Amino acid sequence: PFQRGILRQVRSLLEGRRRAMVSSFTGTGKTRMGMEYVVDLLSSDEEPLVIWVAQKGELLDQACGAIEQIWPWRGQECGEPLRVFRFYEGARFDEEIPRRPTLVVASSQQMLARIESDDPFARAVLARAGLLVIDEAHHALAPGHQVLIREYEKARGSAVRRTLGLTATPGRSNLLDPSESRQLAQLFGQVLVVPKVAH
């Protein structure tokens, strides 16, 4: 039930805002909740493309595993096959992005390197994506992540753009500089969604 509650909040918040962050303890299904929201968008957006970014390969593999579990059941609603691009570990793509539901699972390092080299695939992905998901979003204050968010929003222009952060630790752990936690909150529009647990 708490996962459904978080999803309801995320759907509602990202209808009217550009950015939000979900925080839930390790093992409570953040990837699953995030991927349920991704499937919502891939099933309903006119240009169904989502970018899912993380720093570690194991997190990207988890994201791929989650979509492979969910799409066969939920994806039937839109009656379209899903295309998944695994844009990490040096993978390159020169093909055109399909008009059908598409998920680009990418390492943040690869996305940044491709943006800096003006890679046409990376640029096209940024311009087409209705949602950017940042896993382990407590790292989003790193300059690279901020460049990624900025380039995504610039590429989308006036089109709908949403950024969803997922983390178990919404505050930065640097106790010497509490302003980092405030900056992280500002980066996600001061919107933090947490589980509502009965006392």
Image (cartoon, rainbow, N blue to C red):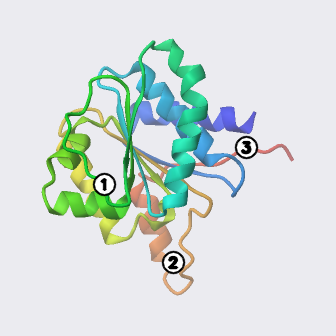
Q: Check the image and report above or below for 171 versus 101.
A: below
Q: CA distance from mark 3 to mark 1?
A: 28 Å
Answer yes or no: is residue 12 visible: no
Q: Which residue is mark 1?
A: 149
Residue 59 location (% of width, % of height) = 54, 56
Answer yes or no: is residue 56 visible: yes
The reply, left or right, for residue 107 in relation to residue 191 is: left
Q: Which mark is residue 178?
A: 2
Q: Which mark is residue 196?
A: 3
**Res. 14 image quadrant:** top left
**Res. 143 image quadrant:** bottom left
Tell me the amino acid under the disc marked 3. Answer: Lys
Q: CA distance from mark 3 to mark 2?
A: 25 Å
Residue pictured at 57% horizontal, 77% vertical: 173
Q: Earlier in the sequence, mark 1 or mark 2?
A: 1
Residue pictured at 48% horizontal, 36% vertical: 13
Tell me the amino acid under the disc marked 2. Answer: Pro
Residue 181 location (% of width, % of height) = 50, 69
Q: Nearer the viewer, mark 3 or mark 1?
A: 1
Q: Check the image and report above or below for 91 versus 70.
A: below
